[in-house]
Image (cartoon, grey):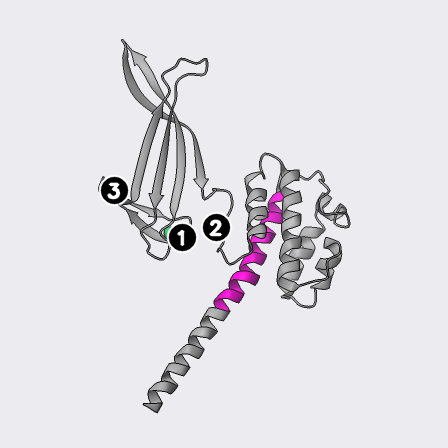
């Protein structure tokens, strides 16, 4: 293999994957089953970006084995692909965001298609976790906690939060306990997830980048100051 271009889902950099960054195994099932024979291929890809160096794990199932005169041929028809690590459905957020928040977000993404109501429940809990952690609001019910931050946050973000909390059943049950499971449509679960992604970007990531930039400026001006003294 000469290497191929690939976008790392962790750091979102375009990189080239060469042999030493790629490991693949094929597991054939030759035992006859009523739904055919399959092979599952698992692949580890390790990001060559030294700042990342994380592994990605993918599994692909092929309807691969057809037997002609006792000779097994690989027809390789793709049946299903799973992005195991990181999960394909959620975005990858940095580690400095608190783990319980990321866990709720990732689980809400994973289960979105299977159970929108479970996803929406996790997403509401995630949103509450974010508001409590980032804005240090007095814990009460989510609807009140949202109102508490209205005058502290960017008006456009407020509009988005306000719009989502008025959607269908999310809105109808906003006053209730976040752990109550309410029936929602798939697009309502999606809206909540999009909202969480936006606030993670706008609050945690923007704050982190700002701090990094200001720290760098301070360090640079101190260094310049030292130079002048020499
Ligand atoms: Zn990477």
Residue 19: which disc? Answer: 3
Residue that numbered label 1 is attached to = 12
In the rendered view of the protein, which quadrant contains the C terminus? Answer: bottom left
Q: Would residue 102 be found to the left or right of residue 74 on screen? A: right
- Residue lying at 48% horizontally and 66% vertically, measured from the top left: 209
Residue interval drawn in magenta: 188-210
Write down the quadrant of residue 213 in the picture.
bottom left
Q: Nearer the viewer, mark 1 or mark 2?
A: 2
Q: Give the SS element for disc 3.
A: helix
Please state the horizontal and vertical placement of residue 78, each as a whole percent of the image: 39, 28
Residue at the (56%, 57%) spot, across then down: 200
**Dominant SS type (magenta):** helix
Question: Label 2, on which residue?
Answer: 92
Seen in the picture, residue 134 relative to 185 is either above or below; the reply is below
Q: Any atom of ligand 1 within 8 Å of the CB at mark 1?
A: yes
Q: Percent from the top left, x then y, of residue 76?
A: 34, 25
Give the mark nearer the N terminus: 1 vs 2: 1
Query: Which percent across, then down, holds residue 177?
Result: 75, 47
């Amino acid at each position: 293999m000469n290497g191929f271009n690939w976008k790392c889902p962790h750091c979102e950099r375009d990189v080239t994957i060469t042999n030493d960054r790629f490991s693949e195994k094929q597991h054939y099932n030759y035992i006859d089953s009523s739904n055919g024979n399959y092979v599952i291929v698992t692949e580890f890809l390790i990001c060559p970006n030294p700042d990342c160096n994380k592994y990605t794990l993918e599994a692909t199932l092929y309807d691969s084995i057809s037997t002609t005169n006792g000779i097994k041929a690989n027809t390789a028809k793709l049946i299903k692909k799973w992005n195991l690590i990181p999960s394909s459905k959620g975005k990858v957020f940095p580690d400095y965001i608190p783990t319980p928040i990321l866990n709720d977000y990732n689980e809400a993404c994973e289960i979105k298609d299977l159970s929108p109501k479970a996803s929406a429940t996790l997403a509401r809990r995630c949103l509450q976790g974010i508001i409590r952690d980032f804005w240090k609001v007095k814990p009460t019910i989510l609807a009140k906690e949202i109102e508490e931050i209205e005058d502290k946050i960017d008006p456009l973000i407020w509009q988005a939060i306000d719009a989502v909390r008025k959607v269908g059943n999310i809105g109808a049950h906003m006053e209730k306990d976040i752990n109550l499971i309410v029936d929602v449509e798939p697009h309502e679960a999606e809206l909540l997830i999009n909202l969480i992604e936006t606030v993670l970007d706008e609050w945690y990531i923007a704050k982190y980048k700002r701090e990094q930039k200001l720290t760098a400026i301070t360090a640079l001006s101190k260094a310049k100051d030292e130079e002048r003294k020499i």
